[in-house]
Amino acid sequence: MMLKKSLVLTAVACLGLPMVSMAEEPPIEAYKAWTATKDHTIWAPLGGLKGDPAKGRKLAIASAKGNCLACHELPIPEEGFHGEVGPNLSGLASRYTEGEIRMRIVDIQVLNPASLMPPMYKNPAELKNVAKKYVGRTILTAQEVEDVVAYLMTLK
Amino acid sequence: MMKLKTAMLMGAGLSVALSCTSAFSGEVFSGYTLLKQETREMQDDDFMNLGMEAVTKGAKLFSTKGKNEKSCATCHGEGGKKLDPKRIAQYPVLDAKTQRPITLQQRIINEWTEQLGNAPLKYESGDALALETFVRNLARGQVVNVQTDGAMAPFIEQGKKLFEARSGHLNMACNLCHDHHPGQKLRAQTLSQGQTNGFPTYRLANSKVIGTQTRINQCFKSVRAEKQPVGSEAFALLELYMNAHGNGLKIETPAVRF
């Protein structure tokens, strides 16, 4: 009986929505407004910043950051348990342009109002009932968005 | 008296029912169907089910006399034998006094002071939860049967709106996961329909029995939303909608969940 119980508890230890916040929050950055085209693309890098694909890959894994793996399968074999709520992102850059990918990361709800994907760079003033420690922040910083875009652009 | 495994319980969580009210569509299934075999066995066996502690505690409180020299058992019978399990399965119901939906726990909290003369119980405090778990357990195996038409219809609609309202830093709403993607994996976790037929439930991640409203607050935390005060009118509406969404499922209280 005790063995069964401990098995259950071990299995449970790794569950729960993995949105763990960091102990110390960096200072709030000023929101950098973006413009989408009518056909749902954002071509200009946020704040004119240049992305780093290696950093983007780490952000895609990090549960308190991009957390892409929560919902998407990605060619990241060292991580187990890829989510299956969203589409598989392998080969993404062969199917979508950089402008389309940036739009989807920044705020996919602009093109799909029913999407459950969190908007990574929505104007914080438009969010409701946000927990205090996140008020005024975007989910990813502008630099982090560009890092993730740069990483996803390597998935050909 | 307590059998190791009753046939009723073995089948309790496996029930799949068709919902037939206008506010809901599609098949409903209990979170039990998503559990590993070990967890199912833990729930099905009263000696292993850690939620039974709350039932035992609730039973004691049920027969404890208050300031008025009355206990719950004075009116509702020893062990609650005069309570109608079918009525318990209808909660939340329309409160005659306020003409608003009232949750089972709120009803117990009200009676605790009005009938027994006790100091007020805090919503989802240990004692309030224990009493609710005990009473709900009396209806284990009964089919959830919340009224959705007539005077309840507008409240069901209000609850539905809350269930579908985006909230928090992640800008998510309950229905986006629990209506659109149940059964799918969110990383290692399988999404449920957010059914409440096992509540109050023993949550392994918390190592204790928790109520529906605390569980919703845990989801709010996951989407980085502000927690809401339990026992509020908004939560009663949300609980009403969620319980009604489970109409047709068998009550499993206390269920065991991740």
Image (spheres, grey):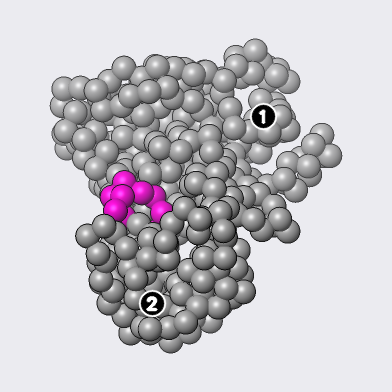
Q: Position of residue B203 (x, y in %)?
A: 59, 44
Q: Nearer the viewer, residue A68 or B206?
A: A68
**Residue B129 visible from this viewpoint:** no
Question: Relative to A62, is A38 on the left or the right?
Answer: left
Q: Main secondary structure of the magenta part?
A: loop
What subunit carries mark 1?
B
Q: Residue type at mark 1?
A: Arg
Q: Residue at x 33, y 24 (%)?
A: B25
Q: Residue at x 20, y 28 (%)?
A: B152
Q: Residue at x 53, y 81 (%)?
A: A24
Q: Residue at x 31, y 50 (%)?
A: A112
Q: Compute the Cα span from label 2 to label 1.
A: 50 Å
Q: Position of residue A40 (x, y in %)?
A: 29, 59
Q: Residue furthest top?
A: B7
Q: Quadrant of residue B92?
A: top left
Residue position marked by numbered label 1 in the rendering: B40
Question: Relative to B73, is B101 on the left or the right?
Answer: left
Residue position marked by numbered label 2 in the rendering: A45
Residue B168 is a magenta residue:
no
Q: Residue type at mark 2?
A: Pro
Q: Nearer the viewer, residue B153 or B224?
A: B224
Nearer the observer, disc 2 or disc 1?
2
Whether B16 is drawn above or below A76: the answer is: above
Tell me the quarter of the image containing the N terminus of chain B: top right
Residue segment shown in magenta: A109-118
What subunit carries mark 2?
A
10 Å crowding of disc 2: few (<14), some (14-19), many (20+): some
Whether B69 is drawn above or below B85: the answer is: below
Whether A84 is drawn above or below A125: the answer is: above
Q: Quadrant of residue A133?
A: bottom left
Q: Position of residue A34 (x, y in %)?
A: 28, 74
Q: Secondary structure at mark 2?
A: loop
